[in-house]
Amino acid sequence: MTAVLVSMEAYEKTQYEIGLLRAIAKGEADAALAIGEDLDGVFDRIDANLASTK
């Protein structure tokens, strides 16, 4: 077994990147199963939320 020392910043960046990859993989799996919202619906909801905060 080998141990590798990395800085805290490098470790945190790696953990963040792993989280992004997991989110992308989940999104691709959900899209393949047609789970979730369509993009137009998401943008409509965002627009409505932004309009209500003005």
Image (spheres, grey):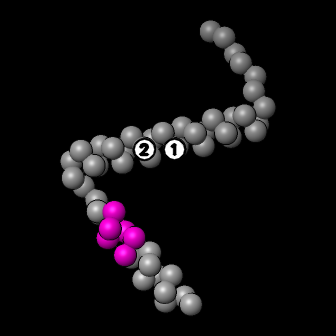
Q: Are marks 1 and 2 in contact (CB under 8 Å)?
A: yes
* Image quadrant where one finds the N terminus: top right
Q: Please, is residue 2 above or below residue 38 in the view?
A: above
The disc at residue 20 is: 1
Looking at this rendering, what residue extends furthest in the right direction?
7
Q: Position of residue 26 (x, y in %)?
A: 37, 45
Q: Magenta segment, principal secondary structure?
A: helix
Does 20 appear in magenta?
no
Does 42 appear in magenta?
yes
- How dense is the environment of label 2, judged by Cα within 10 Å: few (below 14), some, or many (20 and up)? few
- How dense is the environment of label 1, judged by Cα within 10 Å: few (below 14), some, or many (20 and up)? few
Range shown magenta: 39-44
Q: Residue at x 32, y 68 (%)?
A: 40
Q: Position of residue 21 (x, y in %)?
A: 48, 39
Q: Viewed as shown, does residue 40 lie left or right of 49?
A: left
Disc 2 element: helix
Report how far apart the C-alphas of labels 1 and 2 lie in the structure: 6 Å
**Amino acid beneath label 2:** Ile
Q: Position of residue 16 (x, y in %)?
A: 60, 43
Q: Viewed as shown, does residue 54 lie left or right of 9?
A: left
The disc at residue 24 is: 2
Disc 1 element: helix
